[in-house]
Amino acid sequence: MTNLFELEDVVFSHRKDLPPVLKNFSLTVEEGARTAVLGANGAGKTTLFYTLTGVNVPQSGQIIYKGTPLEYTKDGLRSLRSDVAVILQNPDEQIFCSLVEEDVAFGPLNLGLDREVVEQRVTKALRDVRMTGYERRPLQQLSGGQRKRVAIAGALAMDPKVMIMDEPTSGLDPQASMEVMELAEKLSLNGVTVLLSTHDIHLAYRWADVTNVLCEGRVEFKGDADEFYSDTETVYKCGLLTPSVFSMNRDVCAVKRIDPAPHPHNACEFLAKFGRNSKSGKLLLVPSEPEDAEGRFDTAVGDLKGTNKGVYGSDVRNALTDIDIEYRYDGMEGCFKDVVEGKDSILLYDPVYAPTMDRQIDRLKKFGFDIDCEVMR
């Protein structure tokens, strides 16, 4: 992968009389990688994100974007921010207008886009965050979680090349959090480089390709999460804990006296390693566009009667709102887990997620489990 951002010995302090928040900070962000930024409160995660977008100007050091040092001019910052969208932890910091649709349209209109294009982007972004029907609602009448979803929609409407997400699931209910992670996955599959900070170590462990851990304004670790969590002393030093599936794998392997590698990153992988059925259940994968989702659902259920059904992706989920589905918000995890347990399952998903399904199938093969899988054409 090529480097998208390069930070070289960056020092940043909010005031001259205060100690620096970023201390000789060096980091690279690879283009296209799903990158998690972890660390305790005060480690420098939010400051890093503000620095990447040119809001914070370092006292020393250099930030390079696409091979060129950042220019802190009006044109330089406008060019950077046309590529890079940010979702802040506090949505009120990035809400500028009084009505939902006006706020989501704010960024694209400032880019000079045609109003018809902007309207299409606003409609799609609001649907992706389950805020359709709120277009004319005053923002002050929304809950904190709803305002967070509007802020996410505003970032999505920018159609960015880089998406920076600072605690994107903070303040959201579990279903909305699951949809945000689906969006992060979709963005990555569409070629967007996604950086995500979170206190949810379980979420990051399942999702990220690269894990960066900050501690007291420096990069303590960068690389594969399994390597980081294997060093308990460093984990504690950074104010973190190990994900539960990592800890369970380590403990079971210690009892069985076997190598903890490969490390499962989710429940279905853990079951594949330790508790799988002797025979795989049948998994029917059904990629579905919204307009034909109901018809494909009926056909799939006819092929596998009495099985659990799941969905993955906002388009197919919104198209099947009136249909009884067992795994509506955790479809991928639920369906793959069923199959590992020897049960048949049907998973309908937005076609963009086909590589995600392939990746999970390949991951299970690392644990010696071959799924009986068919893709419905």
Image (cartoon, rainbow, N blue to C red):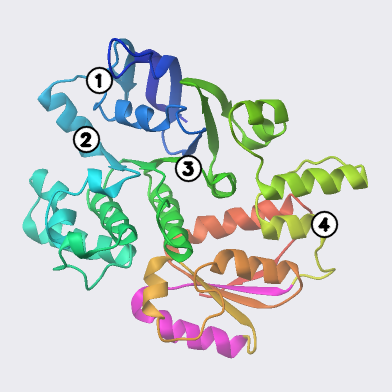
User: Which segment did they paint magenta?
Assistant: 281-303
Main SS of the magenta segment?
helix
Q: Secondary structure at mark 3?
A: loop
Q: Amino acid at mark 4?
A: Phe
* Percent x, y of residue 324: 50, 86
Q: Residues within 10 Å of mark 2 (few under 14, many from 20)?
A: many
Numbered disc in front, either 3 or 4: 3
Find disc 1 in the rendering and name its residue: 70
Classify 17 as above or below 120.
above
Which of the two labelled residues, at mark 3 and mark 1, occupies the earlier sequence position? 1
CA distance for labels 2 and 1 = 11 Å
Find disc 4 in the rendering and name its residue: 274
Numbered disc in front, either 3 or 1: 3
Which of the two labelled residues, at mark 4 and mark 1, occupies the earlier sequence position? 1
Which label belongs to residue 106? none
Find disc 3 in the rendering and name its residue: 198
Which of the two labelled residues, at mark 3 and mark 2, occupies the earlier sequence position? 2
Find disc 2 in the rendering and name its residue: 81
